[in-house]
Amino acid sequence: MNSIIFESKSVVPSKVVCVARNYVEHIRELNNAKPEEMALFIKPNSSISRELRLPEVGLCHYEAEISFIVTDNRLRGVGFGLDLTLRDLQKQLKEKGLPWEKSKAFDGSAVFSRFIDFDGDISNLGIELYINDRLVQKGDVSMMIHKPEEILDHARGFFTFFDYDILMTGTPAGVGPFERGDLFLGRLLYKGEEIIRTRWVVK
């Protein structure tokens, strides 16, 4: 089973629960319709990675997300996550009205920094993603349609959260493709100050 780092401890999430279309500008950039209700999907443990690898097939997009560890059915830890998406495959499957797990839940599609214990005001969290020293994504909780506690509360109506499961809260505008050798820098911010910095070189 794949693991993540929470503080200095290696823990094993059973799954990652994600919300789609949670930032208005991201909805617009992909020409999607704003969902009438919260849209959730799951990535299995096999999708979790601490390395960033470009898949061998398809056009892959990065999506930076504020991510949380859940314990005792509450948001406990926070980290920086990348939701990787095989965009062309997702489009094909959606056009045919088919499930699109293959485009979202493939091996290595949920990439995470370390997580830290967090008991601050979630509304003050923000995120930035730089690729090759260029800022490509920037967002914060105030820009979310559904706030993290609301997402967790809704998701718990459908899914049991085991300790150390992960909640991903959607991506701001600026998603796009990437290449092997690209340098990713993810910054998680609290009240504008950096609390997590993580780097990946795409393999």
Image (cartoon, grey):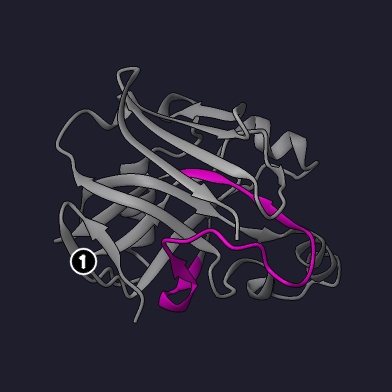
Q: Which residues are magenta?
A: 42-65
Residue 16 x, y percent position in the rendering:
41, 65
Residue 64 within the segment the image draws in magenta = yes
From the viewer's side, name the closer residue of 15 and 7: 7
From the viewer's side, name the closer residue of 171 and 144: 171
Residue at 66% x, 59% y: name it.
85
Give the left or right position of residue 187, taking residue 94 as reference: left
From the viewer's side, name the closer residue of 125 and 27: 125
Q: Residue furthest front?
A: 181
Residue 7 within the segment the image draws in magenta = no
Q: Residue furthest bottom?
A: 1
Residue 186 x, y percent position in the rendering:
46, 38
For the C terminus, give its image quadrant: bottom right
The quarter of the picture where residue 166 lies is bottom left
Residue at 17% x, 51% y: name it.
7
For the N terminus, give its image quadrant: bottom left
Q: In this rendering, is residue 84 above or below 63?
A: below
Can I make out residue 105 in this image? yes
Give the left or right position of residue 87, taking residue 123 as reference: right
- Residue at the spot of label 1: 10
From the viewer's side, name the closer residue of 84 and 20: 84
Q: In this rendering, is residue 81 above or below 46?
A: above
The quarter of the picture where residue 70 lies is bottom left
Regarding mark 1 in the picture, which secondary structure is present there?
strand
Q: In this rendering, is residue 160 above or below 196?
A: below
Residue at 77% x, 42% y: name it.
30
Can I make out residue 38 in this image? no
